[in-house]
Image (tube, rainbow, N blue to C red):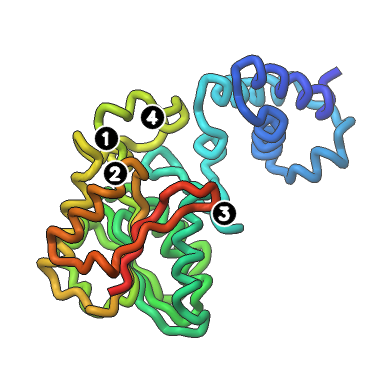
Amino acid sequence: MHTISNVLRDAAITLKQYGVSIPDLDSKILLAHYLDVSKEYLIINNDMKLSAEQLKEYSKLINRRGLGEPTSKIIQRREFYGREFIVNNYVLDPRPDSELIIDVVKENFSKDKDIKILDLGTGSGCLIITLLLEFENSLGLGLDISEMAIKVASINAGKYFNDDRLSFVVSNWLQSINISSFDVIISNPPYIPNNQISKLSPEVKNFDPLLALDGGYDGLTCYENIIKQLKETKLNSETLIIMELFSENKDKVIESFITYGFDKDKIEILKDYNNKDRLIFINQ
């Protein structure tokens, strides 16, 4: 009998056999997505029968997940900081680790402060959108070299804003952008060294865009481009800079900032909630 309860049980078993880490949750999320209902609905109506056609289509989703496609990419949604964002193969999946950027900004500004925020490599827009929602008087600009990523970010922004507080521009980092008026510059740039991309999980290397992962042969290419452009433009001396980093490269990133004239005493490395080096923080 193809009841919701039985179907979920069988799907979880299948995903577990594939090696999926959270088979019970993924099976529920995918069925709720396919039926366009909530996970709570599945629990309340666990004896509801699925048709043969429904079972067939749901099985296709389970197989996609089992073969390595992330659940978020299948349903094209991902939660970040308690809010839902559209994602697809053109943008990096929002990571819980990146929520630390939001927390650091909140620690440095009062919520009623009217700050201007620049997001380099905005991707889905989850960082800058979240910050503008947390700081209701703020303004923001998101930059990305990918036109498709900018389209995704714009769709996400449209879900939460109906005003002109936030803009997106296709740009190769800071090219042609006046950054002197920004109070905060944030970025989660590509930082995976070329030779380590093949070692990433299938969910990442096969379904996140290479453009958002590849940091060059040593993982430093994007940092060096950003740092150089920061010094070539008129950076406000009070601007906070917060960038996510690859922990193994933290010393080299610090060295790059110092090489381009940043004060080493103003540079900090912040750890994430797993006690891993996660952010470089510069309070000039």
Going by the image, does 116 lie left or right of 227? right
Q: Is residue 105 above or below residue 43?
A: below
Q: Reading the chain from its start, which is encountered first: label 3 or label 4? A: 3
Q: Are marks 1 and 2 in contact (CB under 8 Å)?
A: yes
Q: Reading the chain from its start, which is encountered first: label 4 or label 2? A: 4
Q: Quadrant of residue 242?
A: bottom left
Q: Quadrant of the N terminus?
A: top right
Distance from Cα at disc 1 to Cα at disc 2 = 10 Å
Distance from Cα at disc 2 to Cα at disc 3 = 31 Å
Number of the label disc, if any, that sits on residue 193:
1
Q: Reading the chain from its start, which is encountered first: label 1 or label 2? A: 1
Q: According to the image, label 4 marks what residue?
A: 205
Front disc: 1 or 4: 1
Q: Are marks 3 and 4 in contact (CB under 8 Å)?
A: no
Q: Are marks 1 and 3 in contact (CB under 8 Å)?
A: no
Residue type indicated by callout 1 = Pro
Q: Whole-percent x and y of residue 251?
A: 27, 49
Total tally of numbered discs in the picture: 4
Front disc: 2 or 3: 2
Q: Reading the chain from its start, which is encountered first: label 2 or label 3? A: 3
Q: Reading the chain from its start, which is encountered first: label 1 or label 4? A: 1
Q: Residue furthest left?
A: 232
Q: Quadrant of the C terminus?
A: bottom left
Residue type indicated by callout 2 = Asn
Q: Are marks 1 and 4 in contact (CB under 8 Å)?
A: no
Q: According to the image, label 3 marks what residue?
A: 84
Number of the label disc, if any, that sits on residue 249:
2
Distance from Cα at disc 3 to Cα at disc 4 = 23 Å
Q: Element type at marker 2? A: helix
Disc 2 residue crowd, few under 14, some 14–19, many 20+, Cα 10 Å: some
